[in-house]
């Protein structure tokens, strides 16, 4: 695996070469570092943070400032992966000028590109942002910011007419200048057809294996919420129980006095013999609180 930073040109080249693209979400520095070190091609700072981080029932309450904050935390901790930051609800819906300004704000906070939802109706907005030299990833199918208009989180594009509309949306997004396109919650057959019709890479989530790449929410992949498991999610670990068990053990040890033990405590220095007559004497070191990582290991 190359340590070279992944660019939009690299991603488009991967489609041409038939190399599948990997993408995961991250919302903070720790997860961003781990995902990047594992070799994922793209990190999505998704407005899904409204649900998995903030505890909302959907993504609608998330603001542009919150996306900028989380995007900056992820970008600071990433060396190789391409960082895409979602444009949240109402950050690109009113005027194209406002959309460009908000996209620029995300880039100034570390985003390599931005993602927005919608098909043909967002073509002029996508084009305006692209003309401002900001790469745009599109997103069609199940679009979470349209949860009320779509009647909930439901599979989209079933039936010939609905499928044709999504194909036309995909082509419009490509024509507007998007460098890539997320296909969410659509039938495998339709996602494959769209992927084959486009020259830009498609990233699927709940869209089958006919896409040029895949994306999952990191908490879903790791099984950190064992009460939530949609059909399209594969859990590569089941960490919810591990986390609860670890915390339970910590509680037991604190209450019993087993933690902290001697190995996890600081100790006074051993008494030092008085210097012999004539020896140089160093000035005593003042007390200091161990704030730095190196201090805390001793």
Image (cartoon, rainbow, N blue to C red):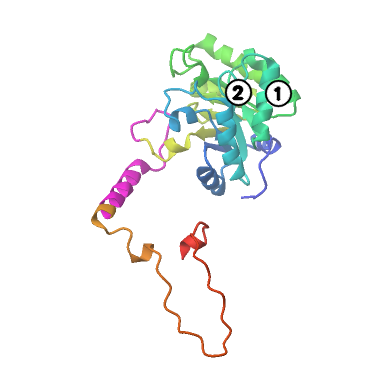
Residue lying at the far top in this picture: please name it.
Answer: 161
Relative image position of residue 257 (x, y in whole percent): 26, 58
Q: Quadrant of residue 56?
A: top left
Queried whether the magenta region covers residue 244, the answer comes back as yes
Report helix, strand or loop for mark 2: loop
Q: Along the polypeptide, which appears first: circle 1 or circle 2? A: 2
Marker count (numbered): 2
Mark 1 neighbour density, 10 Å: few (under 14) some (14–19) many (20 or more): many
The residue that appears at 68% across and 38% down in the rendered structure is: 7
Which one is in front, 243 or 178? 243
Relative image position of residue 211 (x, y in whole percent): 56, 29
Q: Using the rendered image of the protein, determine whether residue 91 is visible from the camera's viewpoint.
A: yes
Q: Quadrant of residue 115?
A: top right
Q: Which residue is mark 1?
A: 129
The residue that appears at 40% across and 68% down in the rendered structure is: 267
Q: CA distance from mark 1 to mark 2?
A: 11 Å
Confirm or deny contact between disc 1 and disc 2 (CB under 8 A). yes
Queried whether the magenta region covers residue 2, the answer comes back as no
> Measured along the vertical axis of the image, is residue 126 above or below residue 19?
above
Relative image position of residue 64 (x, y in whole percent): 58, 26
Relative image position of residue 24 (x, y in whole percent): 52, 37
Which one is in front, 250 or 265? 265
Q: Which residues are magenta?
A: 226-253
Q: Which residue is mark 2?
A: 116
The residue that appears at 27% across and 59% down in the rendered structure is: 258
Residue lying at the far left in this picture: please name it.
Answer: 256
Q: Using the rendered image of the protein, determine whether residue 179 is visible from the camera's viewpoint.
A: no
> Measured along the vertical axis of the image, is residue 298 above or below residue 101?
below
Report helix, strand or loop for mark 1: helix
């Amino acid at each position: 695996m190359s340590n070279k930073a992944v660019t939009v040109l690299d991603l488009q080249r991967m489609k041409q070469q038939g190399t599948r693209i990997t993408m995961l979400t991250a919302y903070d520095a720790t997860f961003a570092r781990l995902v990047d070190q594992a070799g994922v091609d793209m990190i999505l700072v998704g407005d899904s943070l409204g649900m998995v981080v903030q505890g909302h029932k959907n993504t609608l309450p998330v603001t542009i400032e919150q996306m900028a904050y989380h995007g900056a935390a992820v970008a600071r901790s990433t060396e190789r992966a391409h960082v895409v930051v979602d444009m949240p609800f109402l950050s690109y819906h009113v005027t194209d000028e406002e959309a460009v300004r908000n996209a620029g704000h995300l880039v100034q906070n570390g985003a390599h590109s931005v993602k927005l939802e919608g098909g043909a109706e967002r073509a002029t907005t996508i084009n305006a942002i692209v003309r401002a030299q900001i790469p745009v990833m599109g997103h069609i199918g199940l679009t979470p910011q349209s949860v009320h208009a779509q009647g909930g989180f439901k599979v989209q594009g079933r039936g010939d007419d609905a499928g044709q509309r999504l194909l036309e949306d995909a082509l419009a997004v490509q024509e507007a200048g998007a460098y890539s396109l997320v296909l969410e919650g659509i039938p495998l057959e339709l996602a494959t057809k769209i992927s084959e019709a486009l020259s830009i890479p498609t990233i699927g989530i709940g869209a089958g294996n006919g896409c040029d790449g895949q994306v999952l929410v990191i908490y879903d992949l790791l099984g950190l919420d064992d009460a939530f498991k949609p059909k399209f999610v594969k859990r590569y670990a089941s960490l919810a129980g591990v986390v609860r068990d670890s915390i339970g053990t910590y509680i037991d040890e604190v209450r019993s006095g087993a933690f902290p033990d001697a190995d996890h405590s600081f100790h006074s220095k051993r008494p030092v013999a008085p210097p012999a007559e004539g020896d140089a004497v160093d000035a005593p070191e003042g007390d200091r609180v161990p704030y730095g990582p190196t201090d805390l290991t001793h």
